Image: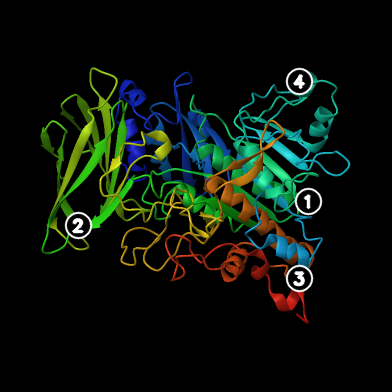
Amino acid sequence: MNQKLENLLQLALQTSEETRERTEDLNIGFDERARTWEVIVKYHGSLDILETLNVQIEYLIAGYALLTVPEGLVEAVAELEQIEYVEKPKRFFYDVIGPAEDSCIQQLSRRDLSLSGRGTLIAVADSGIDYRLPEFRKADGSTRIRFLWDQTLRPDGENRRPPEGFRMGVEFNSAQINAAMEAETPQRQFELLPTADTGGHGTAVAGIAAGSSGRYSGVAPEAELLIVKLGLPDAGSFPRTTEIMRAVTWAVRKALELQMPLALNLSFGNSYGAHDGSSLLERFLDNAAEIGRTVICVGSGNEGANAGHLAGRIGESERMTDVELAVAEYESGLNIQLWKNYSDVYRIRLRSPGGQESALPASVEGGKYTLRLERTEILVYIGEPTPYAAAQEIYLDMLPLGRPYINSGVWTIRLEALKSVTGQYYFYLPSGAARSSATGFYRPTPDVTLTIPSTAAKVITVGAYDSTYQAYADFSGRGYADTERTIGVVTAGIAKPDLVAPGVGVLAPDIYGSYLPVTGTSFATPIVTGSAALLMEWGIVRGNDPFLYGEKVKAYMRRGAQPLRGETQYPNERVGWGRLCVEESLPNEKVYPFG
């Protein structure tokens, strides 16, 4: 077992391609035509030696890189002394279920009529943008988009090239966007700029953060925009880890090049991982947040009420527990993660809906084990702690045998403590967007349902509330309420989310030139992103506080957060420090010395 390889990658490498293709996650990152794996690495020194192995390298920031490795060479690459750790990509899901009226932004505008995000950059990495809409134009009709990178387009080697340092997609500048907008016909526009936001998610997010027209105004209507249309890894059109890391690197580099403060919006998440800040993506974002004058805002996800998480403890008096999982009909597959403290030793038994049982071995050479119950095959991977994570993972991937669906009904996982130090256990299912709404734990735990990467320590983690009722929105991912949590980087005493913003019925522009109410933490997040741009304009652009970026913006927002109905103690796992209030986030004595 190579400890430099994450558990999911080790399982994928030990599983046949035919079986991987039947799973939801194991084949992500594998290119069937090129016979290569795309992986994320943390490294030191030089990686030039990899070129002799026909490995393609994309250097990111802060000692991270993306490698495209020929099939069969992944483990050999991991053995190199320069390689510190390797992960495979994961899929991410958009957090979807008149912004800003309840975030004290209008009050701030009345105090300073010209505070609008001018001189700042807002980066939106999402499904793209309808660049033609008036919401993304200046008063003279020209674009407010400084650069647009469509990762889904194929470079032609001449006029259409990827950004410097990258191999995928095509980058367009403001002059090219303006030329397309001036074209006489939609067909000619598309010929000049062949990009489109077919789903509208990115257009809505960008509009909430920075839209501006006679009919509509986002939070920071004069901020300039960096737009990334994330790559499409499969038919589901969901972005994956590697595309997001490319987008963040590109945006941070552009902000440094343009010498402008940057507020970056990420409105998506995934449920795979220990939810403790230990994955390469989480640690990468922590590093990116410290480069330049940057603020990264990430939605907490919509898993709070999805029954996809269960946590508990096996105590001294009761050393056994049954975890019951409802599996809906027509579920083509399902994976289950169990995260535990390595000091605890559990005997684990799995029982199918028809009553067949099997015990999992305590350990297996190589970590992989396969069992069959009824007409379901279960791939089991028994992980070990890694150099970057102290938690132990047991991963179960359920696949159908001889028919399209796994066995439906009640599956039971029995945990028996052979040695109980903390007695804690944490189960996670895939994101709600990847499974039936009827599949879930019978006694779910709504706490610690933040999606990754909102679990990164140095991002601003944004939950949602219902501004009509001034109350927490139950779908919003909850954070760290467990004061006795003992695994991972994010342990007892760290509070997430940082705050909440309106996320129910938020008015946003759509790709048809109209406006629609949208719901989800996807749309609460750009309210905070736009607000970060306002704070940085006041501090950096206007010279009131040249150090108002990064953790300082987070601290100001936390201080200005206001209470919500039903919440009595702050910070808490539902709303963090409270609801966003931009007016109260700025020092009154500096804005109004006599106020």
Above/below status of 195 relative to 462: above
Question: Which numbered disc covers residue 191?
Answer: 4
Q: Name the image quarter holding the N terminus.
A: top left
Give the spatial CA distance, label 4 vs label 1.
28 Å
x and y, in percent, of residue 557 in the image: 60, 65
Determine the residue positioned at 63% across, 35% down: 166
Residue denoted by label 2? 344
Judge the density around disc 1: few (<14), some (14-19), many (≥20) Cα neighbours within 10 Å: many
| Residue designated by label 1 | 222
Q: Please provide percent x and percent y for residue 213.
A: 79, 44
**Mark 3 nearby-residue class (10 Å; few <14, some 14–19, many ≥20):** some
**Kind of residue at badge 4:** Glu
Question: Are dots 1 and 3 in contact, CB under 8 Å?
Answer: no
Task: Tell which of 23 and 564 is nearer to you.
Answer: 564
Residue 540 visible somewhere in the drawing: no
Q: Which numbered tag is attached to residue 197? A: none
